Amino acid sequence: MTEQTSNTVKTYLARLDAALAGVDPDVRLEIVSGIREELAGLDDDAAAARIAEMDDPALIAAEARAEMPPAPAPPVAEAAPGRAFSIAAVLVLIIGTFVVPIIGPLVGLVWVSMAKAWTRREKIVAWVRPFAAGLIVLAISFVASLFGQNQPTQTNQPTLAFAFVAQWHFVFIVMFIVLPIEGIVLLVRANKRGWRAPSQP
Amino acid sequence: MVADVGTQLRKGVVEFCVLGLLSRQAMYGWELSEQLVSSGLIASIGTLYPMLARLRSQGLVTAYDEASVSGPVRKYYRLTALGEAQLESFRLQWAPFAATVDQLVGKDSGS
């Protein structure tokens, strides 16, 4: 172990080690060690003669690489199942609200419920949220109208009738705001996680 | 596919040839490499070590360090019991396999 390694050997081993960059570290160490064993104890001339018989480090490294198992391919970004359907569902929900009122968002919500991009909880919330928003607005309008009815007069009857119709219009307008926003939220959320619903417990 | 028949054949049997060599005696890497290169089974020592790593990971070959009489401590490889069994299994299949292939592709195999 006290033998001096000749410069020729050191140079060859350094070239070999450099050429083996990227090869499995254990294999790289074994190749270098195996050749070092073979050259150990030789003087410069003997080492040079022995190295001349050996293969070029680049060839040895190429052979080692060819023999190594191929690196596992990066996971193919395969499309999430039903991705197109999920996108269609959310688009129908957003655009359908304006193009085909009532039926459009209804179909959109049904499709969202059938799609695989959202969890069951998200689907339930998607249904409940627009109705809840409508009910809240209706309740507020109803309470407001009660205050208006405290002083019923002949003159304010047409105003009350108008207010009743306006309440319902207001509910629909709120729903038409809520539904597209809900659609955008669902779209952004699904897009962030690759149109796959996270696994549910 | 047909162009590189030699390479494909070598790849199919070279590991068993290593097992065969080691069944006779324990050998160090360079020694094994010389034998296999001279037999035309591998191109260089670069092919040998990944193969030895595979055989070791499969439990067919094991390694140990031993000081040689004239040189440094060398890493020797020898067959395990599992390696022996694997080699025996190959031996049993090789002869009839080679005979069948020879019968099918031989010039005198008939029409």
Image (spheres, coloured by chain):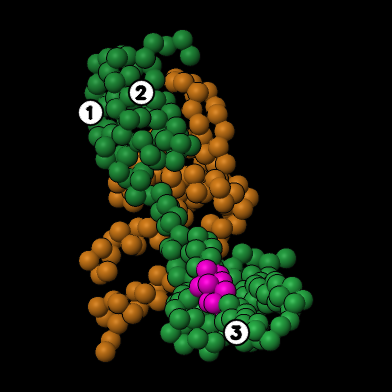
Q: Is residue B111 above or below residue B54?
A: below
**Residue type for callout 1:** Ala
Lower sequence index among marks 1 and 3: 1
Q: Residue at image x 31%, y 39%?
A: A60
How far apart are the two marked residues, 2 and 1, measured between alpha carbons?
12 Å
Lower sequence index among marks 2 and 1: 2
How far apart are the two marked residues, 1 and 3, measured between alpha carbons?
103 Å
Q: Is residue A142 above or below residue B14?
A: below
Chain letter, orange? B
What element does badge 1 sit on?
A: helix
Query: Which segment is the magenta one?
Result: A172-183
A65 or B4, which is in the foreground? A65
**Disc 2: which chain?**
A
Q: Is residue B50 visible?
A: yes
User: Dots 1 and 3: beta carbons under 8 Å?
Assistant: no
- Determine the residue located farthest toward the right in the rendered image: A150
User: Dots 2 and 3: beta carbons under 8 Å?
Assistant: no
Say which residue label 3 marks. A162
